Amino acid sequence: MKRLLFILASLQLTACHGQTNEKKQVETDSKDYMKIVYEQCSKPDIIEVESTTDGYVEVEYLCDGKRYEIGIRNNTLLFSEHSVNLNEIPLDKINRKLEKKYQGWTLDEVSQVKTNDTTFLKVEILKDGIEQNLYFTNDGKWFKIKPIDISSTLDFNAVERNIMYKSAKYKFHKPDSVYEMPDLLKEVSGIALSSENVIYCIQDEIGSIFAYDLKKQEISNSYRFTDIGDFEDLAINKNIVYVLRSDGNLFVYDFKNKTKTSQTMLQISSLNIEGICFSDGYIYIACKDALVNHVESKRMIYRVKANNLDKIEPYLEINIDDLYKFLTKNYSELGITKILFNPSSIAIHPKTKEMYVLSASDRFIAIYKDKQLINIIPLSAETYYKPEGLSFYENGDLLISSEGDKKGFVTGTINLIKNE
């Protein structure tokens, strides 16, 4: 089942998790959002409209021969992007910066982005078939984008003062290191630690395992195991890598025998499976949604022995009502009224054996010890735009990966949070 193909692209968007994206030609006289289009251009030539089921609309159109893209939510203009000519930008300043930090890259396209409080330049560069977006102020200085999620009303100063947050022994909102992913991995959907300096990554749509070198901060290698798909997470057991597809198809890739890849369809009655990890001979698998024909407020985690993938067994039932009660009791100052909790990744702490279950949809980490809920950590959208991956070092240091957006306004990241 194909996950969301169009991820919201604005500094002020709510990340849209697990929803089906619908493409359609617009009937300009019957759509409310066209009023906003007409405010931007009196005679637009509509090229394409993309919308999501939560009310976000992106419109691409021509106006006086220039291409524009705008994002709209709830009849509010979120951003406008339009192409610009090279003679309209401080090209000399930008080229000098590219020569210092991006030698060998070629400047491709430049556009200007306008939000409700600022404008900046988006510069696309190319190298060896890989595209990357960089951002500059209008006068040619580096520009740092910070995502803002307008749906998040949590007070994260209060979160950081909370005793439950402090008890986790991680400063989640103050990472020790932040690694910005190249555009090829801006949709990094899963990570697994290979060695001290190498992380294996998977991204949504390409059937390759990417080795990311933390020291060099670049992709050092890639290993093709299949064609395109909807790949959600991966786990490592010595020289074996397990890659999970959303429909439950598990790909087994052996680094000692790279020409052979096996597949096993896990017998789980879920249409959306996103999390996987390996620990003590077992592979653990998390379902993002409720099981087919089961209670909507329940999420399941299964486990299976790595040497016998046919005998899968239920391991942990997550009750969303229990999560809500825990939050309202232990984080009462936040005024939380709803929790979705759709697991996107899982990992087991190497020392405490606690299971960390990450939900990208509302940015919570639920922590279980001996199958009992012991803590929940709210994550900030500014630090984790769309958190999709977890992995631990042997000493307990934690890695959390976060997808960027399709437009490239927000880059994919891997954050290192050291164990206190």
Image (spheres, rainbow, N blue to C red):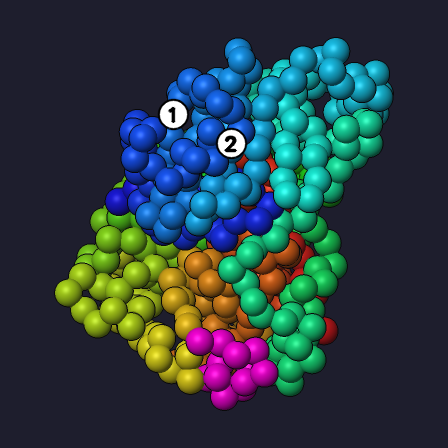
Could you tell me residue 221's position as x and y percent?
57, 32
Label disc, if present, on residue 252 of the rendered structure: none
Residue closest to the eye, 290 or 7: 7
Dot 1: what SS? strand
**Image quadrant assignment for residue 105:** top right
Quarter that holds the C terminus: bottom right
**Image quadrant assignment for residue 135:** top right
Label disc, if present, on residue 39 of the rendered structure: 2
Q: Residue at x 51, y 60 (%)?
A: 151
Could you tell me residue 172's position as x and y percent?
65, 66
Quarter that holds the N terminus: top left
Q: Residue at x 82, y 27 (%)?
A: 139
On the picture, is 209 further left or further right than 136? left
Give the magenta part as a residue range.
Answer: 326-337
Dot 2: what SS? helix
Mark 2 vs mark 1, CA separation in Å: 18 Å
Residue 333 in view: yes
The correct choice, above or below, for 336 with respect to 402 in the image is: below
